[in-house]
């Protein structure tokens, strides 16, 4: 039987093989409830843990030759959570990096002439392509975009892709080959865009370390694999989350980001516990 066991006997359905989903919402400062944006599903979570930390003081008697503990005082209680996510979308990365989300406006849809890539090229090195204002250029393979690279000279010399340079057009990253024919070390290289892209492709961007921590309402919906369909809701009324450990960007196994946090008091909610409320129901009833 889910929920309270009033039978006085064991129930194998109470054994838990935990699965579940994690949701996070920003808090409406006036109500303490999730704001108008609602909950965001954080994706697959291979691990979710709850721990209760208790700080105590023990009193020992001082009237016998051997001192015994005769009282224990609980002076603080704290609930911590930790979980792992293996879906590295930019919203999760933003939370892991305590960052802010925005869109980078890719300036590759405007015409530009003789923008310096390097005033003194070193062959074999890689260079970022930027506009005259210094903004990075991406997605040079966009439909309608026409560009070329030149060596600056009395009469500019057109550089040939594959002969003089190789380029990652998506990233706007170019290497002048050590075997280049039309450009030499120390020459000035420049970029010209004669026709801008028909459709400008902007980029998602996360700016790291823009906030101390992530705060919100955390909802964990547990689905017990031992009793499929019976769900238990863990509602943390206010949590403060931070990254926990490494994010392996090169690894033999899939990358996983770890988060940890502390459940805090949310005095605005009407629940009896202002920290954590756990609910389930009898599916048989």
Image: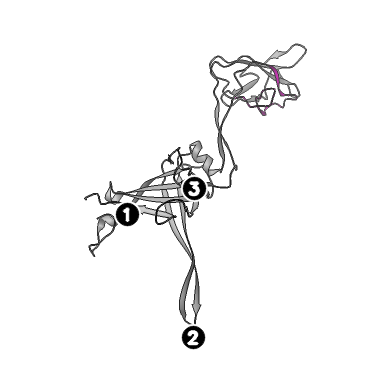
Q: Which residue is mark 1?
A: 16
Q: Is residue 106 left or right of residue 15?
A: right
Q: Which residue is mark 2?
A: 66
Checking the image for residue 258, the label placed there is 3
Q: What x and y, as percent, mark residue 103? A: 56, 30
Q: Is residue 140 left or right of residue 15?
A: right
Q: Is residue 115 left or right of residue 18?
A: right
Q: What x and y, as percent, mark residue 274? A: 44, 55
Dot 2 alpha-carbon crowd within 10 angstroms: few under 14, some 14 to 19, many 20 or more: few
Q: Looking at the image, tell me whether mark 1 or mark 2 is earlier in sequence order.
A: 1
Residue at 52% in and 42% down: 95
Tell me: residue 41, above or below residue 140. Answer: below
Distance from label 2 to label 3 (Cα)?
47 Å
Tell me: residue 103, above or below residue 161. Answer: below
Residue at 32% in and 54% down: 16
Q: Is residue 263 left or right of residue 110?
A: left
Magenta stretch contains residue 253: no
Dot 3 alpha-carbon crowd within 10 angstroms: few under 14, some 14 to 19, many 20 or more: some
Distance from label 1 to label 3 (Cα)?
23 Å
Residue at 45% in and 49% down: 83
Q: What x and y, as percent, mark residue 200? A: 55, 20
> Disc 1 on helix, strand or loop?
loop
Q: What x and y, as percent, mark residue 11? A: 25, 59
Q: Are marks 2 and 3 in contact (CB under 8 Å)?
A: no
Q: Looking at the image, tell me whether mark 2 or mark 3 is earlier in sequence order.
A: 2
């Amino acid at each position: 039987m889910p929920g309270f066991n009033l039978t006085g006997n064991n129930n194998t359905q109470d054994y838990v093989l935990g699965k579940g989903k994690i949701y996070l919402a920003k808090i409406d400062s006036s109500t303490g409830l999730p704001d108008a944006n609602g909950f965001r599903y954080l994706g697959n979570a291979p691990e979710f843990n709850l721990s209760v930390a208790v700080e105590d003081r023990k009193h020992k008697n001082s009237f016998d030759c051997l001192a015994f503990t005769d009282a224990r005082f609980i002076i603080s209680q704290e609930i911590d959570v930790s979980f792992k996510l293996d879906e590295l979308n930019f919203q999760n990365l933003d939370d892991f990096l305590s960052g802010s989300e925005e869109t980078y406006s890719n300036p590759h849809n405007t015409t530009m002439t003789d923008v310096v890539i390097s005033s003194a090229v070193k062959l074999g090195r890689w260079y970022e392509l930027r506009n005259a204002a210094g903004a990075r250029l991406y997605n040079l393979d966009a439909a309608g975009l026409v560009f070329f690279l030149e060596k600056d000279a009395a009469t500019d010399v057109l550089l040939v892709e594959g002969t003089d340079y190789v380029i990652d057009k998506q990233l706007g990253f170019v290497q002048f080959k050590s075997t280049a024919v039309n450009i030499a070390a120390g020459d000035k290289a420049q970029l010209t865009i004669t026709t801008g892209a028909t459709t400008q492709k902007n980029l998602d961007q996360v700016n790291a370390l823009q906030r101390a921590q992530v705060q919100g309402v955390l909802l964990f919906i547990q689905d017990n694999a031992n009793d499929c369909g019976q769900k238990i809701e863990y509602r943390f009324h206010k949590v403060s989350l931070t990254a926990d450990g490494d994010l392996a960007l090169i690894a033999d196994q899939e990358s996983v980001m770890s988060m940890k946090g502390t459940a805090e008091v949310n005095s605005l909610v009407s629940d009896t516990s202002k920290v954590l409320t756990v609910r389930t129901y009898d599916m048989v009833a």
